[in-house]
Amino acid sequence: MDVDASGVPQVAVTGAVPSGPDTDRLLTEAHEHASRHAEGAVADYIPILAAADPEVFGVCLADVEGGLHEVGDTRVPFSIQSISKAFVYALLCDALGHERAFEMVGVNNTGLAFNSVVAIELNDGHPRNPMVNAGALATTALIPGETTEDRWAVIREGLSRFAGRALEVDDEVYRSESTTNHRNRAIAQLLESYGRIERDPGGVVEVYTRQCSLSVDAHDLAVMGATLADGGVNPVTGQRVVAATVARDTLAVLAASGLYERSGEWLFEIGLPGKSGVAGGLVTVAPGKAGIGCYAPRLDAAGNSVRGQIATAHLSRALGLHVFASNPHVEERPR
Ligand code: GLU
């Protein structure tokens, strides 16, 4: 068995994740290993986020059978923030279809910070990447609905179906973000000036701010991820949330852009689609197998949970989840 620089044996597995005790043991190992890391800093550009306890740390794996494995603080609530972008994008793809979503918001990484204005200017106003603020605002603007409240209802209900429970806005986070989101308002207006947002940009920012303020826990993220892993069906409720092709397309976008400017490094190390948020949440998806939800508020310089990445890397290796890993079908062929 290969052991790479991380020291965790790298296995390649196809099919389901191992059952009960094995997965629980690996989760505990991943949590213990990541808990030793105290690098990174809690986000503070949204004032309320700075109040998070940096030591809170939970890891949950939800498999496509609906089984849950949890270690640590998996039921501590936090705001979903950027992770909402993945699921709102899935709702948009479901409503608009593959071609139109591709054309309107794009699928490429910008290589620039999540709140970059320069990225918009460099691309002639095309948002290009639905996983950063410009693309996410364009995505939210395209969600069907007559009024701002209608569109908000589509998003809140849609994300709640992914989670399998009614998600609510954290009012304190919403207020804190609403009074400081000048940059997002500027981005929405810039997109409007390029004709990329055809609705009132103020209403779009309002819905976007609410979607980012939805309160979730690591267990919710795991179930939401497992829904994308399971061809768009929530494995806990048994309810179809989006089409299987939409789950596939969303995961492809996450693989390219889910971890801000560190998306390439993440894919190289972990080999799975994922999405992080600045409150410290991280959702990772092993297609056909499981969703992994982590919460640990200390972030790297790009805005990704440090402990969440370390724990997920451990699980990806130990459970053989890397989508690009394979073993030779026949050990050696005579030439
Ligand atoms: N609501 C945050 C913002 O718009 C989300 C950022 C993030 O999680 O990347 O700045």
Image (spheres, rainbow, N blue to C red):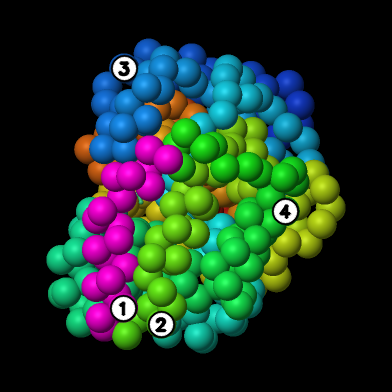
Disc 3 on helix, strand or loop?
loop
Mark 1 lies on residue: 192
Tell which of 287 and 121 is nearer to you.
121
Mark 4 lies on residue: 161
Marks 2 and 1, Cα distance to the nearest angstrom? 6 Å
Marks 1 and 4, Cα distance to the nearest angstrom? 30 Å
Task: Look at the picture and state if 149 lies above or below 225.
Answer: below
Q: Which residues are magenta?
A: 175-194
Which amino acid, by three-letter code, is at mark 3?
A: Ala
- In the image, what residue occupies the spot 69% across and 66% down? 242
Task: Look at the picture and state if 120 lies above or below 39.
Answer: below
- Number of the front mark, 3 or 4: 4
Mark 3 lies on residue: 38
- In the image, what residue occupies the spot 64% across and 48% down? 224
| Quadrant of the snapshot with the C terminus | bottom left
Q: Is residue 282 magenta?
A: no
Mark 2 lies on residue: 198
- Number of the front mark, 3 or 2: 2
Q: Is residue 24 left or right of residue 122?
A: right
- Number of the front mark, 2 or 4: 2
Prevailing SS of the magenta stretch: helix
